[in-house]
Amino acid sequence: MNLKRERMQLISAFFQGTAVNFLKRHTRILDAYFHETYENSAAGLQLNINKSPFAIIALGGYGRQEQCIHSDIDLLLLFERTIPAGAGELIQEIVYPLWDLGLEVGHTTQPLDGCIESAAEDIERLTSLLDARFLCGMSNLYSRLMHLLRERFFVEKPGQVIDRLIARNLDRHAHFGDSTYLLEPNLKEGQGGLRDYHTMLWIARIKAGLQEPRDLEYSGILSHYEYRTLKEALSFIWNVRNRLHHAAERKCDQLYFRHQEKLAREMKFRKEYDQQPVERFLGELHRHMNFLKRQQWMRVYELENERKQRGRKRKLDKTLTPGLEIRNGMLQFTASRKIPDTPELLIRIFEESARLKIPLSAEANRLVWEFLPLVDYDFRTSISVRISFEAILLTPASRFNALEAMSETGILMKWIPRLSEIADRIQYDEYHLFPVDKHSLRTVQNIKKFGTEEDPTPKDLCGRLYTELSEQDRVHLLWAGLLHDIGKGAPGGNHSEKGVALVQEILAEKGYPDDRIDTVCFLVREHLLLVNMATRRDIQDEETAILCARRIQNESRLKMLYLLTVADSVSTGPKAWNNWVATLLEGLYLNVKGILKHGELASHEAVEIVEKKREGLIASAGPRDREVREKLLNLMSPRYLLYTSAADIEKHIELFQQLNHEPFVWEVSRSPEADTRTVTVCGADLPGLFSKIAGAFTLNGIDVLDAQIYTWRNNAALDVFSVTPPRDLYYEDRKWEQAASDLKASLKGELDLGEALRERRSDYGPKKPRVGGQPHRVVIDNDTSRFFTLIEVFTYDFPGLLFGITDTLYKRRLDVWVAKIATKVDQVVDVFYVRDFEGQKVESPDQVAAVQTALEQMLSAAWGEPIEGGGPEEALS
């Protein structure tokens, strides 16, 4: 046979869509090669099979007949007793031609007893033997191997083997992660990958003597529906895996970003409304992998619980609901015939699961799915069903998440049909880690963790606020957590506004009064308000807090909105939540709370605060220094004196007095609240100082997060930067010295920062985002602040971006007073509070157009592409 030609023909047929049962056909082509090679083997004849009985056996995926395009071909050359000298020649005849074709072949040669012993020592070896399949040679030797395996591992020590399989599975999940939640899932080893299916097979073989996958249904392990769904899931994942192998030109199980869009096109996914083909492809993949994860978890849990109950007599908790019982530590329906007469059992079983912290059995899950048609309009509008659902929402989360179980069985989407529009919906970017529905469930779960040992926040603020809420407001908050992104399932527009209309529809159907619906609608509409304000606006400016307070209106709503914001950010992923964001959000929350509690700060009150601060600072100085301090305080702007603490003003005065004839001095301090540094720079108010500081930081791998710029009337500049520390903390002091040296050289005209950053950019960036990608946008806002023009730049990060923007603003004769850098993975929203050199806002249409054009041209030159219309603001939410 011509192995290469037949494989190429089969692979070609696969991509043409005509290769039915590709895995088995591919396996058979390889089987035919081994049969033919064995029959014509000179080395095999010399071994004399009668004197040295041997068998060639397929192992692992090849043994299971799951041979993907570049899967390994695993072989066992098994001898009865000792391994004869000629075994190496036989391996050469069989394996070397496959290597010449570029195929990956793993082989081992062992005697029968050695094979059993190695299986006892190595769980990976044992699982490969569980899938063993005879190819050629002495068939009764293969039969003896299978008999010894059954005696040693299935009969004598089945529990020990299953324990080892479960432990190995947990280790694998910990290493490769949950593929149903990963941007680049591992199709084989991750949770929800093919190994979960294989583990189910291996346990079933040991426990129930399963021979074929179909026996999962025949033996009652899976229902007919579950087995049919399993086949669909495996078919899809294997299809993706084959295409991934072909695209990577090697064995590859990690679905890297660079392959995802190509595979979506190959598999003929089409754009639907505003959902891209790759998003629909990944949503389908996540759905199938989630089914595998769920099935494997249920089988393993049932097995663990069954073994724990064996030989024990313990009193079981009783359920509060007639028609439900606890069996083997899991919830069951007492009889399926009772469900049609009492449909509310379909929700009560999840309420009991939440209360007792135990899962439904596999059979109970099946029955819920089979009786979903009972979830009709009367069921959806039933007040008693709603009360049960509220109890599920309010019950603290445990290992067994009843809300997630409702989602898995389909009853949650049946009870709230609009949720099906966000089921398995992927947002194709590097910011949102989870499908929208999974993110919403995680948000609810994280809300319920506030104040517990599992609280995801570093402080007790969230826990304290959650306990202060009334039970009714907790229900409002949890409903908002579940529905805050419901608008992402509807095409076009702002998802928060779209979500409000859907929430009104959903909660009205559930029988809630208008005032309660309004509260949840408020939370959904404003769920991005605090995080956007905290990361894109000057939270020291009272106007920011006043704007938020006017929209929020009362402290109760503020508490709920803050908790929803934190839970939403934590549930989005590590790129959305860190100590810096936590600090900004808490600061904004406290500022808004102050406004709601005490009212807006009137002008005379601000004057009183400044005057008291001045008096205290003068009094705290020594007798000789009071006159000097008073003169310095007279040089400071009212804005600086109002928003800067007395302690910081004293530090800034000390820094100014160190200036002498130096171009600048700075002080670097660690933030006690976050892993950031505060750099206070004092120097002469030279043209373009801000952009030069930003450029010096960038050259040394230091990212600016936030900046406050103050100018005293003696031509001194006081700039306060919040920055990330240098990447290598071991050499941090050296990096700060180098950054200071670069800034000095730039101020003296000895270093061209623009050229230095261009050289660095040619080496390291700019780089396109790995996934998604939104057009750049520049927004100029004269409405938000009475005193400043706000300039927002939506783009993608690269070395020198901040320098480029601020240098462009300087060249347009604009001073930056506040800078907010909101980085989301590689995408940023840079926000600048500016005034022109005369201290005025940028208000004339010609001036606005000139600034916008200059910034767009700078971005265009940096990226080598035109600036498109629109913007990524909605994509960041």
Image (cartoon, grey):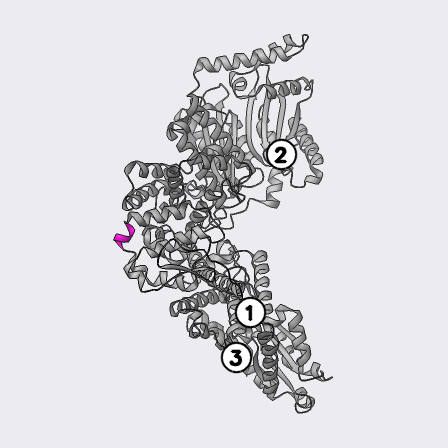
Mark closest to the chain's N terminus, 3 or 1? 3
Label 1, label 2: how far apart the Cα atoms are: 47 Å
* 378 drawn magenta: yes
Left or right: 578 as drawn, with respect to 377: right
Q: Is residue 854 visible?
A: no
Q: Quadrant for residue 41, please give it.
A: bottom right
Mark closest to the chain's N terminus, 2 or 3? 3
Task: Provide residue 659's location: percent of width, then percent of height.
Answer: 68, 19
Residue wearing tag 1: 70
**Viewer-nearest residue: 517 or 546:** 517
Q: Residues within 10 Å of mark 3 (few under 14, many from 20)?
A: some
Image quarter where the C terminus lies is top left
Which amino acid, by three-letter code, is at mark 1?
A: His
Residue wearing tag 2: 697
Task: Provide residue 729's location: percent of width, then percent of height.
Answer: 68, 39
Which amino acid, by three-letter code, is at mark 3?
A: Ile
- Name above or below for residue 575 compared with residue 320: above
* 99 drawn magenta: no
Image quarter where the N terminus lies is bottom right
Cβ atoms under marks 2 and 3 closer than 8 Å: no
Which amino acid, by three-letter code, is at mark 2?
A: Phe
Residue wearing tag 3: 29
Task: Provide residue 876's location: percent of width, then percent of height.
Answer: 45, 42
Q: Quadrant for residue 526, please give it.
A: top left
Magenta-drawn segment: 376-380
Q: Is residue 257 visible?
A: yes
Mark closest to the chain's N terminus, 1 or 2? 1
**Viewer-nearest residue: 448 or 702:** 448
